[in-house]
Every structure is written in structure tokens, then in C-alpha cells.
Amino acid sequence: MESLEQIQNFKGKYPRQLWYLFFSEMWERFSFYGMRGMLAFFMVHELMLDEKTANLQYGATQAFVYAFTFIGGLFADKILGYRKSLFWGGLLMIIGSIILAIDPKEFFFLGIGFNIIGTGFFKPNISTMVGNLYKEGDPRTDAGFSLFYAGVNLGALLGGYLCIAIGKSELFENFIPKNLAWNVAFGLASIVMIVSLLTFVRTQKSLGPIGLSPLMKLQANKRKIIEVITYVGSLAVIPLVILLVSNPGYTDMFMYIIGPLALIYFLVEMIVNYSWAENKKLIAAMIFIIFSIFFWAFFEQSGGSLSFFAADNLDKNLVGLELDPNGVNNSANSLFVIAFAALLGILWIWMNKKKVEPNTTVKFGLAFLFLAGGFYVFYYTKFFASAEGITSLNIFTLGWLVITFGELCLSPIGMSVMTKLSPQKLQAGMMGMWFLASAYGQYFAGILGANIAEASENSTNLEKLNVYADGYKQLALYALIAGVILLLISPLVKKLMGSVK
Ligand code: GLN
């Protein structure tokens, strides 16, 4: 077995294990985004829910998925270790997607329940393992996370496109009988999840001691009992999750409770178990987590208000190609991430060598400036509108390009810095907190989007365009303010971070 030293002393830009984790995460995200991409449509067209209810329930599933990453992270840190957590999570995701493949209408919320808990155990822990491949202070870490992030988006792009197209019988319709199309689409999500898990099983051999149980000192028997209780416990909460997700009113309640509880938990950990030097770093991590909530709340307009904007107010012309504006809204961002993630990673390494690499706070600040720029471009589309309120898909897509650079300065960098700022025993929990912020982002995104949508009710298409565009201008302004604040506080946060860059 390779030692941690040997793994972390790798030559070249990336450790070889990163590629295995890249593929395991790519297939998992294929399955996750494949399913996620079908939910809202399936609820409206197959479960016959009205659009408002479907929107709320879709939002609830996303909020719960990310909220459970916090709990999955905690159990990994305290009981299972990253590897067993990830394996268990993957298994639950496979079961969830098979349930959906068998009868998506009948077992809809049961399948979703398995997937929520499964993702909670899988997602934070694979990201934490990426961080563990690097020694403290290794300047190649951010580049590693950027590459890993390209894997995330490759999976998102493929799954997001293929599953819904199969479900709607727009792809392979000659081979797949129409009445089985949704079963096949959910079935595809389960097959790729099996591939993800098999990839991970092979990866394990090369991970040395990374991700092993934190309870190694306990007797094997005792450890087994605690692990089994965790597995059974996680199965037992599935009915509760189903109840919560299927009643949107409960989502608010859950969101009011889980965040403050998580904060209290970390405060207690900080006071009881860690020194001031460690706590300063944890405070810095919290600052990044809080800013990320705002970032995701704006960014996640993508699935909500921006998809209505795309459907009603955009033409179908992207650099001369005739394309569906919703398809472009869904996939342009992933394509840009795939195109630029590794490049940006290499730029960070190059800047580091020249000693001009911006620190994490400045990168976060830049992320908000790009976000502001992108939303300003969305606003600017209104000056190109026809009398019918139809404007340019080209300019809209340019907005996504700008936002993607912002995402690349925040999302992979945020994961990377979580692993750098947390003490070893709190790593996955902290990564879970990072994703919990996404849960709040998703939640607030829905509320923001609903406000914009409400203001444009009963108006003409042109008026609607103006209301949406003005809403995006507001968001651009708020993002600009957040970016400037981050740049201003960067010296202070740098102090808190100590040796971490
Ligand atoms: N798109 C990224 C992923 O799926 C980031 C998700 C998030 O943090 N909101 O991993």
C-alpha cells in the first residue's frame, strides 16, 4: 500500500488518483444531473402537478440534497470514513434510481428519498478525498480541484442532456417504446451510477490510507456495530425525508432549523476541541461559506427564472446555428467549464510560480465581479429586443461565459480551501457545510426568481423582458457590492487564514 507521503509527493501537475476520482465523480454527476433534469418536467407532465407546485418541490429536492451533504460529511468524519460513506451513498443512489426506473410514477418520492440520502453520503466525501491527495500548502491543489470540476460538468452536461431527451422520447425513439421511455431514462441514471461506484472501488486500491475509518483504534467488532447502526439509521430516516420533500411547507421549516443547528454544532466543536490558531482558519472558512450562499442564490437562477426568460424572450440563433434557447441555457455553462477549467487551473500554477497568484479571498472577490458582469450582460440583452420582446441568444450566452469564469473562481476554489482550512477530523463536515450553503443558495434562488416572475405577471412579452432584465440589473449590483466587500476584507481574511493561501 502506498503511504500518504508517497501519494502526496507526486511529480507533474496532477496526482494520478485524481483521474480516478474525476471519473467516479463524472458518472455520479451524470446520474445526479440526469435525474435532476427530469424532475420538474416529470412532475408537471406525468405526475400532473401544477407548475408552481412542481417548482417548489423541485426546489425542495435540491435544498434537501445539499442539506444532507452536511450530515453525510459528519458521519464520514466521526464514524464511517470517506470511503465507506461514499460507497454507502453510491449504493443508495443506485437503489434510488433503480426504484425510479421500475415505476417512476408510483415510486417517485421513494426513489428521490434514496437519492437524497445517497448523495449526502457521496458528494462531500469524494471532494474531501481530492483535497487529501495534496500536502498542506501544495500550490497545485486549486488546479487539481479545477480539473475535478471539469469532470463534474462533463457528467452534468451528458446526463443533463441525455436523460431528459430519452424520457421525452426525443432520442432513440425508434428503439425505445414510448411507454417505457421514462423507465429507460431513469434506468440510464442507475447504470452510470453503477459505473461510478465500480470506478471508485478500483480507485480505492491506490488511495493508501486516505479515507479509512476514523475509528481504527476501536475493536473491529465494536466498529462494525457502530457502522451498521449508521447504515440502518440512514435507511430509517428515508420515510421522514419523503414526508418532508413531498410537503413544500416543511421545507421552510427544515431550512430554518438545519443551518442554525449546523452553526451551533461547529461553534461547540470550535470551543471544545480546537485551538485559537485552528479556529481562526475555521472562521475564515465560515466567511467563504456565507458569501457562497449569495453566489449560488444568483447563479441558480439558471434552473428557475432564467429558464423562463430563455423560453419567452430569446431567439433561436447561436452563432448562426438554430438551437433551443432552453437547451443553451442549461448546457452553455457546463460546456464553458469543461473548456476553461483546466486552463484556469494551469494559469493559477503559472501565476504561483511568478508569485502573482491572487489569494483565495481575492479569487472569491473576482468571482462576484464576474457574476456581476454576467448578470449585467443579461440585463443588457434588453437593448437588443424586438417589439415582440425577443432578444439575442448570442448576447445571453456571452453572459453565461462571463459567469462561468466567476464560478471557476469560486466553486472549485471553495472546495479546495475547505480542505485546507479544516483540521483533519473536521474535513468532511466542513465540506458538508460548504454544500449546505448551496442548499440555502438554491432555496433563496427560488424566492428571488419567484419575486421576479411575480412582478411580470399579466404583462406583454416585451414588458416581461424589461421586468426580468431590470431584476438581473439589481442582482448585478448586489454581486458587485459583494465582490468589492470581499476585496476590501481580503487582508483581514488573509490574516485569519495564516499559512493557507
Ligand atoms: N455544479 C457543482 C456540482 O454539482 C457545484 C454544486 C454546488 O456547490 N452548488 O458539484
Image: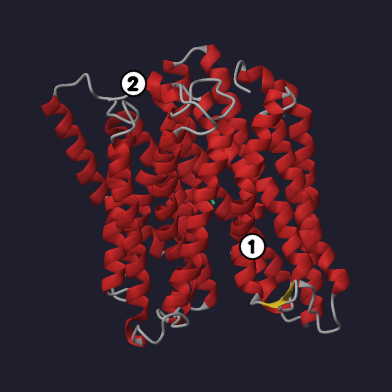
Residue at (27%, 66%) from the top-left corner? 99
Quadrant the C terminus occupies:
top right
Location of residue 268 by image quarter: top left
Residue at (48%, 54%) from the top-left corner? 63
Return the x and y of residue 414 as percentages of the image width and height.
58, 37
Disc 1 marks a residue whose amino acid type is: Ala
- How far is the residue under mark 2 from the one under mark 1? 41 Å
Residue at (46%, 70%) from the top-left corner? 162
Instruction: In this rendered view, identify the residue nearer to me: 224 or 270.
Output: 224
Left or right: residue 499 compared with residue 6: right
Vertical relation: 382 (above or below) 238 = below
Crowding around mark 2 (Cα neighbors within 10 Å: few <14, some 14 to 19, many 20+) is: few
Tag 1 secondary structure: helix
Location of residue 69 by image quarter: top left
Residue on which disc 2 sits: 3
Q: Is residue 339 visible?
A: yes
Residue at (54%, 24%) from the top-left corner? 282
Tag 2 secondary structure: loop
Q: Is residue 261 visible?
A: no
Instruction: In this rendered view, identify the residue nearer to me: 459 or 118.
Output: 118
Residue on which disc 1 sits: 332
Return the x and y of residue 347 as percentages of the image width and height.
68, 36
Left or right: residue 473 compared with residue 329: right
Location of residue 289 by image quarter: top right
Residue extending furthest front? Answer: 12
Disc 2 marks a residue whose amino acid type is: Ser
Instruction: In this rendered view, identify the residue nearer to me: 257 or 312.
Output: 312
Vertical relation: 77 (above or below) 392 = above
